[in-house]
Amino acid sequence: MNPILSSTLLFTLGLGTTITFASSHWFLAWMGLEINTLAILPLMAQYHHPRAVEATLKYFLTQATAASTLLFATTTNAWLTGQWDIQHMTHPLPITLFTLALALKIGLAPLHIWLPEVLQGLDLGTGLILTTWQKLAPFALLIQIHPANSTLLIILGLASTLVGGWAGLNQTQLRKILAYSSTAHLGWMILVLQFSPALTLLTLLMYFIMTFSTFLVFKLSNATNINALATSWTKAPALTALTPLILLSLGGLPPLSGFMPKWLILQELSKQDLALTATLAALTALLSLYFYLRLSYAMTLTMFPNNTAGTPPWRFQSSQITYPLAISIMATLTLLPLTPTIVALLIL
């Protein structure tokens, strides 16, 4: 793609998210979400591959459905309360519609079906944008409205953690595994949203850092399925040794950074007398941990099947810049000792 065109699209993508962040009126927030959606569509279809075009069309239809539901919820709220301000959501009907529309936008279960299929049709760079940046604007709106329907949020959260772990068990495509991983992490954020929005933001930030590291590792290895991971040791042995730690951090295993948000969320749920919910969430995390262990095993303890007719993929070195990857790996692995400082900042 032309660098000027791609820069314009990325600028528009950031502009749409910024408009949603800064808006206090529902129409402006909706407009920001639409600008955001329209800006990413050419990035998704830039390679003109049938899978990419299909994924772009699926994404467009899903986001259009969510946007129309969102607009219907806002007009219903204006009709019932006479208010267009984001902070004045008082009636349960528009709040429920609004929560479900945003759940469809970000890919919460049971409204997540589109996410693995769309991500599978994209390249890893665009997939990284879809699983990170595209979550910011909907989460900003969710935090602003303070959804009062706690039962709905807990159901969405538990369903997402369960489906995200369960459906990822049988996958061999890395992008689909990362899509189900996204759904599971979003479930953890939704579980604690009504009790501690600051903790939700912390979990979202940690998820962004860990996902950024994972996508860049797979991009550097040029891997799209589990078998392709077995060639990583010939390209970057040090990175191959660190990758299992990144994946285990995604799974929330101590003493890595990914354990911090899960620990704090379980603690907060226990404080709110939701011990059963916390137990179920912790058990569903074991499902996700299994397929992260599968990836770790395939990357470090298996050899790629040699095929004389095929081109050895380890002969081609990647030209990707690795400084961002090094910084994100450090953050993915070493932030757990800072937990007391981060908790003190959250309380302030």
Image (cartoon, rainbow, N blue to C red):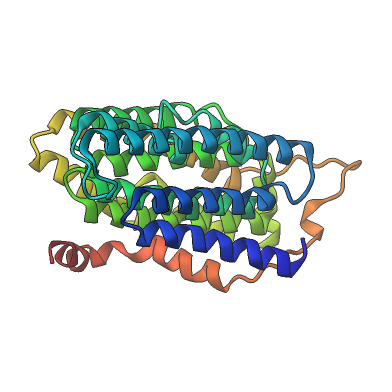
Q: Is residue 77 left or right of residue 57?
A: left
Image coords of residue 240 (percent x, y): 58, 57
Q: Quadrant of residue 279?
A: top left
Residue pictured at 52% horizontal, 70% vertical: 326
Q: Residue at x 73, y 68 (%)?
A: 3
- The percent position of residue 285, horizontal first and vertical second, equals 34, 36
Quarter of the image with the C terminus is bottom left
When the figure is inspected, residue 99 is found, relative to residue 10, above or below; the finding is above
- Is 197 positioned to the left or the right of 208 in the image? left
Answer whether residue 280 is visible to the viewer in this image: no
Which quadrant of the view contains residue 171?
top right
- Residue drawn 16% across and 45% down? 195
Total number of numbered discs in the rendering: 0
Front in this rendered view, residue 267 or 204: 204
In the image, residue 282 above or below residue 241: above
Q: Is residue 56 above or below residue 283?
A: below
Residue furthest to the bottom: 323
Left or right: 167 with respect to 97? right
Query: Which quadrant: the N terminus?
Result: bottom right
- Tell me residue 130's x, y (percent): 54, 49
Nearest the viewer among 287 and 47 is: 47
Q: Position of residue 8 (x, y in %)?
A: 65, 66
Q: Nearer the viewer, residue 30 or 314?
A: 30
Question: Can see residue 63?
Answer: yes
Residue furthest out toward the right: 309
